[in-house]
Amino acid sequence: MSRTSNGASDHQDRDDGSRRRPDRVAFVTYPDEGAARTLAETLAREALGRFGFEGLYVPVQSRLDNVDAVISVGGDGTVLHAAAAAREADVPILGINLGRVGYLAEVEMDAVDHVLMRLGAGDLATVDHPTVAVEFEDGSTATAINDMVVEKVVSQRIVDLEVMIDGELLTTYRADGIIVATPLGSTAYSLSAGGPIIQPTVGCMVMTPIAPHSLLSRSFVLRSESVISIRAMSERPAQVNVDGRGTRQLQRGETVRVTTSDRPVRFLLTGATPFPRAVRDQFGLDHA
């Protein structure tokens, strides 16, 4: 989603009221991203004098210990990886945008000092965003902040996927795949497949078929308590991806279960830009 020059959050319009001054903040980025790593290391080194909290540089996908908040430096991909670690550590995250698209990484470079000084003063509240839990038959699990996708492995061949909702059969899709997105992830792959835009703080899941060979081509917006079961019915395997990362394949007859996780991901709020304005800015509706 779009950003404003003062670092105001554009896609979050409700907070839980919690505000806390952090003592120790991790600046996270990919180690091979030169500009992002240089900025992250500089901010971490100078954080105590400039912003009033201790900073440390942590490569993405590293374990986070004894930190009060996470600052992701890079693009949305960096935020997704860092947010997974922040969620496990039960601390909030904020993204500094160095990429082209900054829906998750929404603080622009000219707003970094202002926003981090506010963080150091305990002036940023947090907001919870739902995540989805993915469970396989062998008991292994994964968590998606944006989306999980069950899709074809062979590009020229579609897959048959049986979908049940709360134990009741919906249909068997013949399609390229099925996306189950969080509200935060509704502007990602799901949107490109024809799904709706969901306000990020709404408690729900969005299920969107990908290029279905069916008249039933629309998305389903499901309550957060729903249980979605997707069963592979083709001789050909299907691939399960979680936040863009390949997790495993489903063989014929195997099922993956998708629910709203009992642990959300927390983002730091930098402002209160209304959701309609955020959508208008993100999709250039003022220039349509």
Image (cartoon, rainbow, N blue to C red):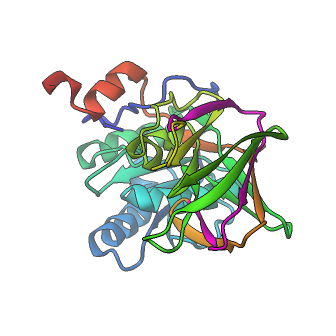
Name the side, left or right, on which 173 lies relative to 77.
right
Residue at the left extreme?
A: 287
The location of residue 21, given as percent across then percent down, is 58, 40
Name the side, left or right, on which 198 lies relative to 222.
left
Q: Quadrant of the N terminus?
A: top left
Residue at image location 62% in from the left, 59% down from the top: 160
Is 78 covered by the magenta stretch?
no
The location of residue 232, given as percent across then percent down, is 70, 62
State which region is magenta: 217-242
Is 220 covered by the magenta stretch?
yes
Q: Is residue 111 above or below residue 285?
A: below
Name the one closer to the observer, 151 or 197.
151
The location of residue 75, given as percent across then percent down, is 36, 58
Name the one closer to the observer, 96 or 38.
96
Quadrant assignment, res 88 = bottom right
Residue at image location 43% in from the left, 50% down from the top: 95
Q: Is residue 212 above or below residue 7?
A: below
Q: Quadrant of the C terminus?
A: top left
Residue at image location 61% in from the left, 42% down from the top: 266
